[in-house]
């Protein structure tokens, strides 16, 4: 039941994020890392948390690479959707592994 609740929560957040702009992706990445994925320590999340920073795109590329994904461009709406989909899948997969163990 906890798994279904976590998936529902992530789906609700994803539905409210508008990926037509860079700001929507930045908010989603920040939320996923701080609430669900938690790959980085709180100190190491600073670059991702600073969604107004001009160096944020580089922080995103490093983050995707650290998670085992490809560094992808995020200049178009389609590219932002691909990154969002990958990160949501990663978060759900991570949650499934934790639930099974």
Image: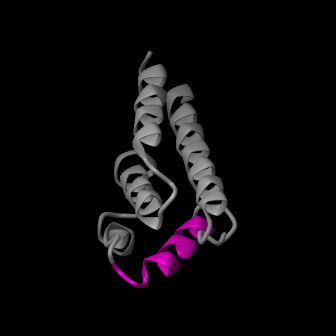
Is-magenta flag for residue 23? no
- The N terminus is located in which quarter? top left
Q: How is the image coloured?
A: one colour
Q: Position of residue 93 (x, y in %)?
A: 60, 39
- The one nearer the camera, 23 or 92, is 23
Q: Position of residue 101 (x, y in %)?
A: 54, 30
Task: Name the residue: 35% across, 47% down.
Answer: 35
Furthest-right residue in this view: 70
The quadrant where residue 23 appears: bottom left
State how many labels appear. Answer: 0
Looking at the picture, does residue 54 appear above or below residue 3? below
Is-magenta flag for residue 62? yes
Task: Name the residue: 35% across, 70% down.
Answer: 51
Q: Is residue 1 left or right of residue 90?
A: left
Q: Position of residue 10 (x, y in %)?
A: 44, 36
The quadrant where residue 65 appears: bottom right
Looking at the picture, does residue 99 appear above or below residue 68? above
Q: Is residue 78 left or right of residue 55?
A: right
Task: Name the residue: 43% across, 53% down.
Answer: 28
- The one nearer the camera, 11 or 33, is 11
Task: Name the residue: 43% across, 84% down.
Answer: 55
The magenta span reads 53-66
């Amino acid at each position: 039941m906890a798994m279904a609740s976590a998936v529902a929560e992530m789906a609700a957040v994803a539905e409210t994020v508008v990926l037509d702009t860079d700001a929507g992706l930045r908010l989603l990445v920040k939320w996923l890392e701080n609430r669900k994925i938690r790959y980085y320590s709180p100190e190491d999340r600073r670059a991702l948390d600073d969604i107004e920073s001009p160096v944020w795109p580089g922080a995103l590329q490093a983050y995707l690479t650290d998670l085992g994904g490809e560094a992808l461009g995020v200049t178009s709406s389609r590219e932002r959707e691909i990154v969002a989909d990958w990160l949501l899948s990663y978060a759900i997969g991570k949650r499934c592994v934790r639930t099974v163990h």
